[in-house]
Image (spheres, grey):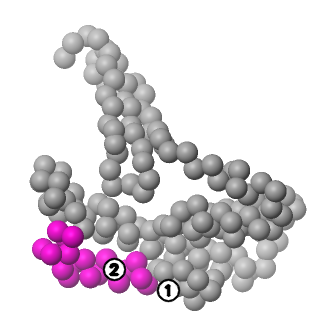
């Protein structure tokens, strides 16, 4: 390896929701000096909630992401708690348990989606397989039972969210 530092750019980063790029700066010995993950899309969600009453924020921010609306909703609800000086320890135990269960259901369905829909093609077929082979369609065709279980797992998480919060 040469004694010069160099930069590696991975663009686009695939198998993530949205668009991103990674830059890695190597030092003179070829070791990682810095690594950055860049979100290269403008969302602008801060602007679309301006002018709305604060109590609408949990409902509005749910629309930021189709994969993790519950996470955004709970973050906004916690922000409102902080604005009012509500100590999380002072919340009714049932409210705390429902929030945690909603969060766990969100994580469950999100992980099912990421693993089975986004990562499994690379894991099952390898990153060197042809692009058309590395797709969820190919997973469904060649590993139908695994694909079915992935769909069922995500559906379970979404149904749990629906049972707790009234929508999925």
For image coordinates 33% across by 38% down, the residue present is 11
Q: Name the residue under label 2.
A: 151
Circle 1 is placed at which residue position? 159
Residue 52 in which image quadrant: bottom right
Task: Report if residue 159 is visible in the image.
Answer: yes
Q: In this view, does 38 lie above or below 110?
A: above
Considering the numbered disc 2 on the image, is that residue within a helix, a strand or a loop? helix
Observer-nearest of 151 and 35: 151
Q: In terms of sequence position, does the residue under pointer 1 or pointer 2 come before the other? A: 2
**Residue 88 or residue 40, whichever sits in front:** 40
Q: Identify the residue at horizontal 47%, vertical 80% (top origin).
A: 157
Compared with 26, 67 (above or below) is below
Image coordinates of residue 64 in percent, x first then y, are: 58, 61
Q: In which quarter of the image is the C terminus?
A: bottom right
Q: Main secondary structure of the magenta part?
A: helix
Magenta region, residue range: 137-156
Give the percent coordinates (x, y) of residue 140. 20, 75
Q: Which residue is drawn at 58% across and 83% down?
A: 167
Characterize the local packing of mark 2: few (<14), some (14-19) or many (20 or more) Cα atoms within 10 angstroms. Answer: some
Q: Residue furthest top?
A: 3
Which sits in the foreground, 116 or 33?
116
């Amino acid at each position: 390896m040469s004694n010069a530092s160099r930069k590696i750019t991975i663009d686009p980063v695939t198998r993530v929701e949205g668009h991103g790029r990674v830059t890695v700066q190597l030092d003179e010995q070829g070791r990682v000096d810095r690594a950055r993950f860049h979100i290269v899309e403008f969302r602008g969600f801060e602007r679309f909630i301006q002018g709305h009453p604060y109590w609408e924020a949990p409902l509005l921010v749910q629309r930021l992401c189709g994969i993790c609306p519950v996470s955004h909703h709970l973050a906004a609800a916690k922000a409102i708690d902080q604005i009012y000086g509500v100590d999380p320890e002072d919340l009714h135990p049932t409210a705390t348990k429902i929030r945690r269960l909603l969060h766990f259901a969100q994580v469950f369905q999100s992980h099912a989606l990421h693993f089975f829909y986004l990562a499994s093609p690379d894991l099952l077929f390898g990153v060197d397989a042809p692009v058309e082979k590395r797709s969820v369609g190919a997973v469904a065709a060649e590993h139908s039972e695994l694909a079915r279980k992935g769909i069922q797992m995500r559906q379970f998480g979404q149904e749990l969210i629906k049972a707790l919060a009234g929508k999925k």
